Image: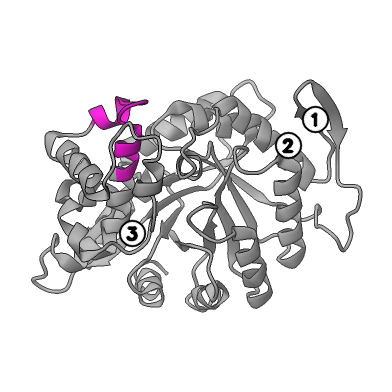
Amino acid sequence: MRAGVVVAAQPGVEDLAVRAEELGLHSFWVNDTPMVHGDPFVALSLCAKATGRIRLGIGVTSPALRSAPAAASGLASLNALAPGRIICGVGTGNTARRTLGMRPTTAARLENFTVALQDLCAGRSTEYREGGRVRDIRFLHAGAHVNTADPIEFVVAALLGPKAAAVAGRRGTGLVSFGLLDPTAWHALHDTRRHAAQGTPRDPDSHTDSYVVTSLHLLDEDEDPHGDAARDATGHLVLSLLAFAADTAADSPAFAEQLGPEEREAVRRLLDRRGTTATAPDRHTKLYPNYLGRIAPQDRDLVLPSLMNTLALVGTRDDLLARITTLEQAGVDELLIQPVIDPPTEMALLAKLLT
């Protein structure tokens, strides 16, 4: 299986990209969460100039964040700096919208956005709509300005729901998911994608890449798999899930209702600890600061073993390789880690494990 890394945009991100390339990693992604992290297009511009081989990904953008012309311009500009090395993840903007106190957009709008980006980034015209006004648009200047000749890879962000996977099938894109380490779930996503591709000009059996974002902690001999070190390495993923459950408990309770009693109690404690409630209109300002950043020691008790095992890879070398193999057999092509403790060391561990 291939290996890659996902980071937040910040000064010095290009140094991490250079190190990832030196380690032989396949891709380097930057989050698109505007009110929490820096801008991925700015960050990846620096990475594009500092590297020469590694693929560079936006993980992920959304029509709820950017218009298609603006996003296409950014992507095609990156493609001019790093020809043929750009990956664009697209999604409904679940986290990026919720950090604004808003709901994500619809699968239909996501599909229209994906169509527009695919067309524009390939140099084709596309339909652009604002209210009742519809126009065909295209890049009016190419050449040195933007690169529409070299292909850009598109992947749709999907978790367990079938709608995003169906968009991927109809549009011929790959898939990317966050913390989805269940091989059965991956088989279901790929089946949905393949079924949706039937009846389209796309070959339902053609291969497109699948990526999963997780975290990785290699246990030392006799180390507690649920000790402080393991919780610190995986806690950002666990707290992101708890924050999502807390944020959606009132208006979209289906997700929280799937959690067990211990997990629901952790959600309650998180709300209390952040000084908010599941119905407070400003809860997003309390739940999402430091989103996907290193957790505070006082929050380690919220990092439940059940959620660590669900979202992250923790174990001995043999344990990790066994779980990675099952994911590969389920159709996952690339393992992306989101390091928070010591990114260079964590990237080196991933490279040693998989490359």
Local crowd size for mark 3, using a 10 Å CA cut-off: few (<14), some (14–19), many (≥20): many
Q: Disc 1 versus disc 2: distance between alpha carbons?
A: 7 Å
Q: Give the range drawn in magenta.
A: 243-258
x%, y% of residue 347? Answer: 40, 71
Question: Is 246 contained in the magenta span?
Answer: yes
The amino acid on which the numbered mark 2 sits, given as a three-letter code, is Ala
For residue 1, the mark is none
Q: In which quarter of the image is the C terminus?
A: bottom left
Q: Label 2: which residue?
A: 116
Q: Label 3: which residue?
A: 215
Q: Which of marks 2 and 3 is nearer the N terminus?
A: 2
For residue 127, the mark is 1
Q: Disc 3 versus disc 1: distance between alpha carbons?
A: 39 Å
x%, y% of residue 10? Answer: 53, 69
Residue 181 visible from this viewpoint? no
The amino acid on which the numbered mark 1 sits, given as a three-letter code, is Glu
Image point (32%, 64%), residue name: 294
Image point (32%, 27%), residue name: 250
Contact (Cβ within 8 Å) of mark 1 with mark 2: yes
Question: Is 43 contained in the magenta span?
Answer: no
Contact (Cβ within 8 Å) of mark 3 with mark 1: no
Residue 55 visible from this viewpoint? yes
- SS under mark 2: helix
Colouring rule applied to residues: one colour
Q: In which quarter of the image is residue 225?
A: bottom left
